[in-house]
Image: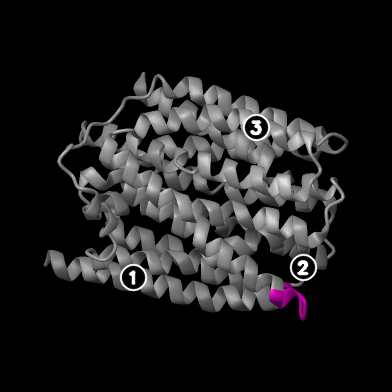
Amino acid sequence: MIRSWFKVFYAVEFIGVGVFMPYMAMFFIRKNLTSIEVGYLLAITPFAGFISQPFWGLISDKLNLTKTLVTIGCFVTSVLVLALIFTDSFWVLLLIVAIISIVRSPIHPNVAALALSHLESRGKQDEYGKFRLWGSVGFVLATVFAGGLLFEDNLSLTIYIYSISMFILGVISFFLPDRQVSSNIQWKDGLSLLSGHIELRVLLIGIVCVGVTLGITNQYLVVYLNELDASAWMIGATVAISAIPEIPIMSYAEKLIRKWGLRITYLVGLSVLPLRWFLNMMITDSLVALYVQTLHGIAIGSLLCIGVIYVDRILPVEWRASGQALYVSSLHGLGPSLGLFVAGLIMTVGNTRLLWALCLVVGILGTYIIRHAMYIKSNNTT
């Protein structure tokens, strides 16, 4: 039954994400904010997560508050997000978005820590993908069946649905198993986690590079398809189609790891990202470009499943939440923040082809650095 609660948690979490996140920019635009103000509101989310997630990870591991932080984060976010509806002031919105980002930032890495701890106690750590794939299922369903059909005239509905989903997650969190770690761990050990672990440090540098490319594609993919004169239905279908390959990747992750090993499986999944950026540069047919985006799901399935397992393996179990927080803050925090900043500068003088060229270079660099980090592990193990 516990396994089912984890699956339901991930499904509900990403149903909320699929309904809410794609409409944030349009929601703010309809409040008559300037493009620069909307840009700041979008950028503060990953940046606040990058700043706060490592500290939440330390608190989780040191004080044994992993499950508690999930519960509090869900309920508080459920209430705070409603405040977005009742103000049009940029500065008030900026404050609300920043606080929401900080409060909800421990939810995802801490749930991953709980899931990995539960699986490890049963000797099935590599089955994490069977939990996480339900998040992808929820995301696809939300984007396919909801989409603009529900929210075209009333974007506030997305806020209400997201609030309800977060409240439901708070209730579900009561049914998740907690984890226990040694109370003898020291704050200084957590603060020196990066400086004392060269493999993790190098890995996260590569992850930041990959995060740069993901931040750009999340915000500029629609712009790219619009440049190719893609129809409205095609643009709307892209988000769902790009996520569909995540499901089989996560479902068969355990078998892939057993057959090819964790390192090769992870690197093969990442290697499709540079291929995607190269094809985006070359393709001029919107229909072909649509199918190319399925490569996104292969890479994301690897990043959000295989990568999570890999980070968990290279760190002591007492720093499980901290490791996941560092991983998530690099992939979804610092990386996207840097990418969106540079992308904004590039788009003032060019089109999305220049963005894909940047992603190609940075993506290849990130993949090489991650490969090097795993080679450090291989040498140490040998």
Residue that label 1 marks: 371
Number of other residues with Cα within 10 Å of mark 3, as a class: few under 14, some 14 to 19, many 20 or more:
many
Q: Give the Cα distance between marks 2 and 3.
A: 35 Å
Q: Amino acid at mark 1?
A: Arg
Q: Residue 285 bears which disc, if any? A: 2
Query: In terms of image quadrants, where is residue 360?
Result: bottom right
Q: Residue 162 bears which disc, if any? A: 3
Residue 154 position, x and y percent, is 84, 34
Looking at the rendering, the stretch of residues picked out in magenta corresponds to 345-352
Q: Earlier in the sequence, mark 2 or mark 3?
A: 3
Q: Is residue 293 above or below residue 341?
A: above
* Quadrant in the picture for the C terminus: bottom left
Q: Give the Cα distance between marks 3 and 1.
A: 37 Å
- Return the residue nearer the eye: 349 or 64: 64
364 relative to 257 in the view: left or right: right
Secondary element at image label 2: loop
Secondary element at image label 1: helix
Q: Residue at x 72, y 72 (%)?
A: 352
